[in-house]
Image (spheres, rainbow, N blue to C red):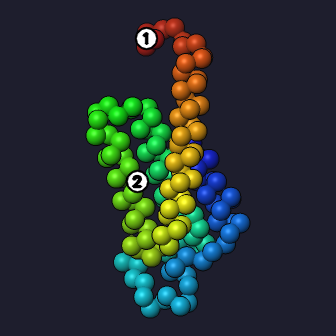
């Protein structure tokens, strides 16, 4: 799932759209303080951090099925916090993070559906750990 999410964010978006990150934009150079971190590659649309973290969050929400009840809120808040950090540090524009979150959520949902289908349709191995 992460291979698809991460590679997709680079191949489908960053290498195609080629929008410079805010920290690589000359007009914003004096306004952005990276806080001692590196800016990253030249292009920033979409945020791979947002893509990967939202893919994990949505997949885990599906697996956990809100058990405990607060798990969905915590997972989305965690992914949103990581995503916001990319804007705060000047590595991405808000749109980069928003589209990355949407793409990652889609990937996480698709992989959860594949996981669910496999769980429901493929036979479990018999052995000591079988249900």
Distance (Cα) linking label 2 and label 1? 32 Å
Return the mark for residue 72: none
Discs 2, 1 touching: Cβ within 8 Å = no
Residue at the outermost right position: 16
Rendering coords of residue 22 (x, y %): 52, 79
Return the mark for residue 79: 2
Task: Work out whether residue 93 can be spotted.
Answer: yes
Quarter the N terminus occupies:
top right
105 above or below 12?
above
Quarter the C terminus occupies:
top left
Q: Residue at x 50, y 52 (%)?
A: 52
Task: Work out whether residue 48 can be spotted.
Answer: no
Along the horizontal axis of the image, is 63 left or right of 1?
Answer: left
Q: Nearer the viewer, mark 2 or mark 1?
A: 2
129 above or below 33?
above
Callout 2 secondary element: helix
Rendering coords of residue 97 (x, y %): 49, 64
76 above or below 120?
below
Label 1: which residue? 131
Q: Residue at x 47, y 50 (%)?
A: 54
Count residues near mark 2 (Cα–Cα under 10 Å), then give few for <14, some for 14-19, many for 20+. many
Callout 1 secondary element: loop
Q: Residue at x 48, y 70 (%)?
A: 94
Rendering coords of residue 20 (x, y %): 60, 77
């Amino acid at each position: 799932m992460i291979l698809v999410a991460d590679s997709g964010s680079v191949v489908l978006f960053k290498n195609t759209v080629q929008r410079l990150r805010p920290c690589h934009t000359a007009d914003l150079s004096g306004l952005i303080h990276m806080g001692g971190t590196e800016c990253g590659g030249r292009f920033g649309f979409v945020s791979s951090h947002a893509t990967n973290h939202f893919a994990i969050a949505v997949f885990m929400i599906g697996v956990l099925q809100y058990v405990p009840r607060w798990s969905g809120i915590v997972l989305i808040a965690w992914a949103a916090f990581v995503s916001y950090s990319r804007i705060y540090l000047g590595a991405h524009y808000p749109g980069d993070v928003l589209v990355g979150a949407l793409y990652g959520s889609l990937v996480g949902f698709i992989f959860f559906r594949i996981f669910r289908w496999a769980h429901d349709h493929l036979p479990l191995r018999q052995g000591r750990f079988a249900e």
